[in-house]
Amino acid sequence: MWYLFKGVVLTKYNLARRQWRGSRQCCFCNFSESIQHLFFDYPLAKFIWRAIQVSFGISPPLGVHHMLSTWLSGVHKKLKLLILVGASSMCWVIWLSRNDLVFDKGLVPSYMQVIFRGTHCTRFWSLLQKEEDHSIMKMRCRMLETMVMETFTREQMAFYKQNCLLICSHV
């Protein structure tokens, strides 16, 4: 998170500023891969922050400086620290997913895979918190996973119903 805050994460944009000659294109899409794009503007990141917004009723961060300064103004200090652990794990898994794609030539992960990887990471990192906070973080991870699963299930059902109606109308 310190690297994000300082703006020195080695995205393709930052590498190009250091005379790297490779493509600046995001590995997920055609935009320039900057910190802002990868962690906040890319549709995967937007989905993650929107899922957090829907699950917990907090507005999504607009960027790194917003996330680490005024994003959680008015939230109790203890809860703010726990939310930042979860937000940090989500940023970490976005970065890991990007690196899997760039360096290991892996497949583009689904949004649901990234969310679940993030909640797994959050649960693991919760072990570093005070013991009374473990159950809070586990419960919050479960809430996020449930919301995401319900959203994907509804979208898949709507997709299958629409395709079934199209198929049946042609028969």
Image (tube, rainbow, N blue to C red):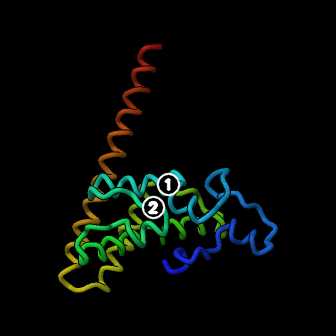
User: Could you say which is closer to the camera, residue 68 or residue 87?
Assistant: 68
Pointer 2 local density, CA inside 10 Å: few below 14, some 14–19, many at least 20: some
> Which amino acid, mark 2?
Val
Q: Which residue is disc 1 drawn over?
A: 44
Residue 89 seen in the current view:
no
- Pointer 2: what residue? 114
Q: On the rendered structure, is 152 left or right of 171?
A: left
Who's the residue at 33% across and 55% down the image?
53
Amino acid of disc 1: Leu
The dot on residue 143 is none
Q: Quadrant of the C terminus?
A: top left
Q: Is residue 79 left or right of residue 37?
A: left
Which tag is nearer the camera, tag 1 or tag 2?
1
94 over 28 or under it: above or below: below
- Horizontal and vertical percent for residue 159? 41, 33
Q: For residue 160, which quarter of the picture? A: top left
Circles 1 and 2: CB atoms closer than 8 Å: yes
- Can residue 80 be seen? yes
Query: Which x, y percent locates residue 93?
Result: 48, 68
Answer with the quarter of the image where residue 164 lies: top left
Residue drawn at (72%, 61%) of the image: 24
Mark 1 and mark 2: Cα distance apart in space = 8 Å
- Look at 21% across and 72% down and name the residue there: 136
| Secondary-structure class at tag 2 | helix
Mark 1, secondary structure of its residue: helix
Could you tell me how many numbered marks the image carries?
2
Nearer the observer, 146 or 16: 16
Q: Residue at x 63, y 51 (%)?
A: 29
Within 10 angstroms of label 1, few (less than 14), some, or many (20 or more) residues?
many
Sooner in the amino-acid sequence: mark 1 or mark 2: 1
